[in-house]
Image: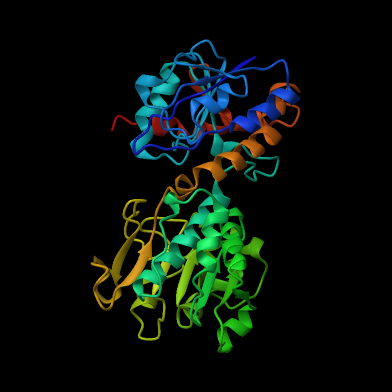
Amino acid sequence: MKFGIIKERKNPPDRRVVFSPDELVNFKNQFPEAIIKIESSDIRIFPDNLYQEKDFEVTEDVSDCDVLFGVKEVPINSLIPNKDYFFFSHTIKKQPYNRKLLKAILDKNITLYDHETIVDEKNARLIGFGRYAGIVGAYNGIRAFGIKFDLFNLAKAETLPDQKALIQRLRKHPLPYIKIVLTGSGKVAHGAKEMLDAMKIKQVSVENYLTKKYTEPVYTMIDVLDYNKRKDGQTLDKYDFYNNPTEYESDFEKFADVSDMFIAGHFHGNNAPVILSKEMLQSHKCSIKVVADISCDIDGPVACTLRPSTIADPVYGYLAKEHKEVPLSHPAAIWVMAVDNLPCELPKDASEGFGEMFLKHVIPSFYNNDANGVLARAKVTEKGKLTPRFAYLQDFVDDKE
């Protein structure tokens, strides 16, 4: 079987890649029969020569490969018909801006495996960049806090080589006695937690966080039942929340009233309550000054996230009493960091980590007859049609716009 690493062509440019040169060596060692080609790229974090030094062929043409690996969406005019592709298509939630892409994939008889659909038997994601979003998101949030209060001005994450360099910068600038609330329990939240722990910020229990004052910066990490409550007052388990989200309402206000910074690393499911509402932000008790919304759901659970921000311009101001964006210089502005492509700021680490996961969880399926069903579950399209697992997208594809 012949595999190809494709050049990223989406704008703004994305420097990540599915496999680093070193991870491709591991790939080849495990599966020596594999043929691997690299499409030449002038933007990839690992330049062509690093692949050539590992004896991989770098070429302008990968059209003879059976399976093609990319990160972001492939432009329609660059799709090669009758191939198997892996990339983040951003179509499985019926994203309207990529309807034409999904139609083209079907028209070109492409078999699409979306990185987001690579899951285990329990539908848990096997690969992704979530950890790196958390790492960069926490760094960006602390950077924003430092600039807002003239404490320090950290270098942008994108200018630093790796997580280690980010941590070194953070450790040079101790925070004042602030409280940070971190939502979530998955890879994103744990990536953010890594950074807070690396700064030696003390983690405290929810009860102590809500009731005690500290003479050092502290944080608490909260899950769904910490910031949601049943409307009828019952206390059940988190699976009840997942199964009956409409029976719940936000209980986050108690955190908003005592927190200086909110790092949002949660996953927000359909029909789940708003977490941080406009009313909470407008309350005179609200003490939040910076929001690092790593999850970045627009018009979603965090009311001050009005729009995504960019790597070039990562923070904007939010005026709670008028629910609108204002300049960062506004004296009442809450600063909002809502970059929606955070892992792009740490392309080397993110690519290395992604390749390790991909080699572990995906590549063996090509050589063991997909014994664990990984490829079968991940397959979105095949032979010009949606697979049964993704048949719910048919009306999206048929939409005449």
What residue appears at the point 36 percent right and 58 percent down from the top-left corner? Answer: 299
Name the spot of residue 112 as percent of width and height, x first.
52, 26
Q: Is residue 212 left or right of residue 142?
A: right
Compared to 18, does 278 lie above or below?
below
Residue 271 can be seen, yes or no = no
Name the spot of residue 131 as percent of width and height, x first.
58, 52
Residue 330 can be seen, yes or no = yes
Count how many numbered circles sit on residues in the image. Answer: 0
Camera-side residue: 28 or 9? 28
Q: In which quarter of the image is residue 357?
A: top right
Compared to 286, does 317 lie above or below?
above
Compared to 119, does 399 lie above or below?
above
Name the spot of residue 145 as percent of width and height, x first.
41, 71
Name the spot of residue 166 as percent of width and height, x first.
52, 58
Identify the coloring. rainbow
Camera-side residue: 3 or 306? 3
Quadrant of the snapshot with the N terminus: top right
What residue appears at the point 74 percent right and 32 percent down from the top-left corner? Answer: 372
Q: Quadrant of residue 193?
A: bottom right
Quadrant of the snapshot with the C terminus: top left
What residue appears at the point 57 percent right and 43 percent down from the top-left corner? Answer: 128
What residue appears at the point 56 percent right and 83 percent down from the top-left corner? Answer: 216
